[in-house]
Amino acid sequence: MILSLFLLIESTVSAESFSEKFDNQIYASLLKKHVVGKRVNYDGLKKDEKLLDEYLAILSQTDIKSLSGNTLFAFYINAYNAFTIKLVLTKYPGINSIKEIGSFFSNPWNKKFISLQKRIVSLDYIEHDILRPKFKDPRVHFAINCASKSCPQLLDEPYEGRILETQLDSQARKFINDKKNTFIKGDTLFISKIFKWFRKDFSDNPVLFIKRYASTELKGELNSFGENINLEYLTYDWSLNR
């Protein structure tokens, strides 16, 4: 059903609606309208789903080979996030978590429903076969959004190649300095399970990465422990980030 839905999206959007130069104007307007802080207004996005479909069709027909560097990096981050929204909307408002979209044999991330240049791929493919191995930048974990409360928040603007470094730094800093995601209690540093699941992406040293983006106060606390700090990983809340 999901596959046929995206084939329909591609076939119904006219060729005239695709500009020769790729841009994110539609997506920018949707994010500005429906993302406030950590919350995503899925009710509003459901009403604007036709606009989202137009943007997804643009993504699907973009000549990826014409993109490179940070422009390509930003393209795939936006694709991951926009198609995640669409996946949620296919079942919304009947779900409270993206994980409810999965089944006994599959999960939402390995569903092949994303059309990119006539290939049908999954969110897992974008993350684990493109974003992580190709760009090798751990900050991507704070840019892609899994539609859940414990995920780094969805940025309220598209990622753009020309400002991507600033955007990625900002997202990492924002997540790490949120006391719901990172805090010290006694001799233990409590951090997101993102650092456990993708420990190798952080050079097997999440504390060093955290220090790089920590506030002066948090960095001072971490330095006072030296190497003698215990790590605990916080329970991940998979409920929708609405």
Image (cartoon, rainbow, N blue to C red):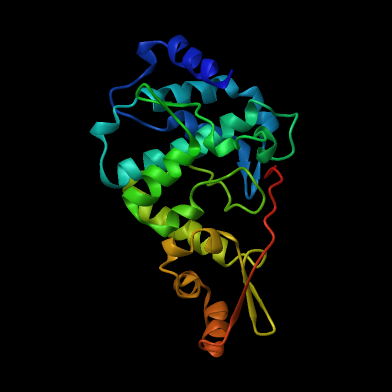
Residue 158 visible to the viewer: no
| Residue at 55%, 63% in the rendered image | 196
Residue in the foreground of this view, choosing between 38 and 77: 77
| Residue at 48%, 38% in the rendered image | 80
Residue in the foreground of this view, choosing between 216 and 232: 232
Query: 55 left or right of 87?
Result: left
Q: Is residue 81 above or below residue 16?
A: below
Residue in the foreground of this view, choosing between 208 and 32: 208
In the rendered image, which quarter contains the C terminus?
A: top right
Q: Position of residue 194 (x, y in %)?
A: 55, 59
Q: Position of residue 145 (x, y in %)?
A: 55, 46
Query: 47 left or right of 70?
Result: right
Residue 225 visible to the viewer: yes
Q: Is residue 36 above or below residue 11?
A: below
Q: Is residue 96 above or below residue 181?
A: above
Q: Position of residue 96 (x, y in %)?
A: 74, 38
| Residue at 44%, 10% in the rendered image | 11
Q: In the figure, residue 236 lies in which quadrant?
A: bottom right
Q: Is residue 154 above or below residue 60?
A: below
Q: Position of residue 54 (x, y in %)?
A: 48, 21
